[in-house]
Image: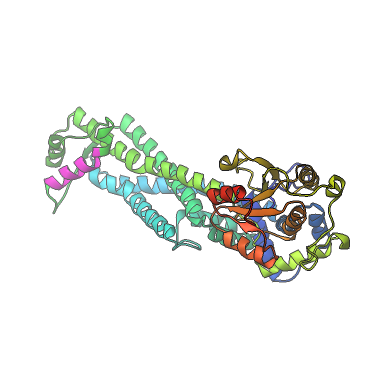
Amino acid sequence: MDSRPFHPAGDAPPPSALQMALIVRAVQRIEREGPLDDAAELRRAWGAGGTRARQVALRAWLLGDRLGLPQELARWRSWGGFAVLLLALLLALAGLAAARSVLTPERSINAVAAFVTLLGLHLVTLLLWLLGLAWSARGGMLSMPGPSLGRWVLAASARLAPGRGRHAPLLWQALAGVLGRERLWPWLGGLLSHGIWALSLALTLLVLAFAFAFQSYRLSWETTILSAGFFEGFVRATGALPALLGWPVPGPEAVLAAGRGAPADAASQHAWAMWLLGCVLFYGLLPRGVLALWSWRRWRRGSAQAQAVDMADPAVQAIVRRLDALEPVPQVLDPEHRAAAPTTAQAAAGAVPGAGAPLVVGFELRPQQPWPLPELAHLASERLDGSGAQRERFFARLAAERPASLLWVVHAGASPDRGTARLLREASQSVPRMALWPLGEPGRERWRAWLKSEGFSGLALVEQAQPAIEWIADRERP
């Protein structure tokens, strides 16, 4: 549950939460094929301090760095940008080629057919994405989505990137697993798909505008089985949104005249050309651009909160046991040795606990979590990130202030470990009443089960601000 970033050696920037999660997942897949020699990496991760979850993640990152996984990931990302641009260009060329197919030798364009060829595939794929998003919101999409532009780009980047190593397929599998676990597939797929379509439609719009500006075309409509009223209604319906924003749209007379093959006046043809450009802009480029921006925001927020390590994984628990074995014997505190000796600061104080004001402690919260909490801003507070020096200052404060009650505030999605248990047990020697408040919905039951398994029967669990305030106010309650 340590939120401090890991700084690799050299000038390389610290990995993001998603990069760390990908490397951890990829290393786990590699180790399924056989154990790796990790003695040096394990000891280095243990020496870095922090929680067991952080140490497990650092061990995996160090192993991945030795295997070249971060470099493979960087090569994959750079190739992915090229694949996005290439696919956008191909889509734009395909759309323009299809639109050109409705151009007659007399430079006459069937405007309605051009609308369908330019926007038809885009509208169909957009509808499918929206349906998939609705299905995902109901809990239906927990793993990899079906075929999409975004998935194609990711797969092509992983499998076709030049100079790729032998672990590239494992990175693809790791990405699929992490995105499925964190429910990020719709947003990454949406970001790539909408971004590609937005680039493609922007190129299409530029080419159309250039052609209409410097060449003469006659836009009309033709039919064998449809009525003139259908085309009039189609133009009126599709031009409604652009017209609301002041965009020129052909009127009923211009639509009927275009179908009869009457000589076209300049004003009518200008309205027809602007109608087609407006449809590409308002029904194509703008929706894709807005959805790409929305997907990017959701993707950025979700990827920043990705959990690198699942502490319930048996393989992770085996690594935790090996890390525990590196602890010096006098510092090990097993469940049967719950009553540890007082700290130096406590012994120096020599005071009876429980006389001071309540204290609220935020322990290894996310960096973006505001502190102190607005609901408890009137109380004395402390924020710990897990460092040894900070803990010493914290216990010195406990010895000096002797708070009557101590409320621990933690991130519910984090995984408690033995370091957390030692901290709570040591604090319980100075404070008669303690409670724990896991912030967030997912993970509360894990904390409840962990408290029970560690024997913290006297430590209350609160889930909302009001119960926390009431617990602090009620000094008689345990």
Q: Residue at x 51, y 57 (%)?
A: 183
Q: Nearer the viewer, residue 135 or 67?
A: 135
Q: Nearer the viewer, residue 109 or 239?
A: 239
Q: Which residues are magenta?
A: 229-240
Q: Nearer the viewer, residue 212 or 337?
A: 337
**Total number of numbered discs in the rendering:** 0
Q: Nearer the viewer, residue 78 or 7?
A: 7
- Residue 63 visible somewhere in the drawing: no
Q: Residue at x 59, y 57 (%)?
A: 158
Residue 47: percent from left, percent from top: 82, 54
Which quadrant of the rendered structure holds the C terminus? bottom right
Q: Is residue 230 magenta?
A: yes
Q: How is the image coloured?
A: rainbow
Residue 311: percent from left, percent from top: 67, 63
Q: Is residue 228 above or below residue 333?
A: above
Left or right of 301? Residue 26 is right
Q: Residue at x 30, y 40 (%)?
A: 279
Which quadrant of the rendered structure holds the N terminus? bottom right
Residue 335: percent from left, percent from top: 76, 67
Residue 149: percent from left, percent from top: 46, 54
Q: Residue at x 55, y 61 (%)?
A: 181
Q: Is residue 259 magenta?
A: no
Left or right of 37? Residue 274 is left
Left or right of 352? Residue 29 is left
Q: How would you classify the magenta stretch by its main secondary structure?
A: helix
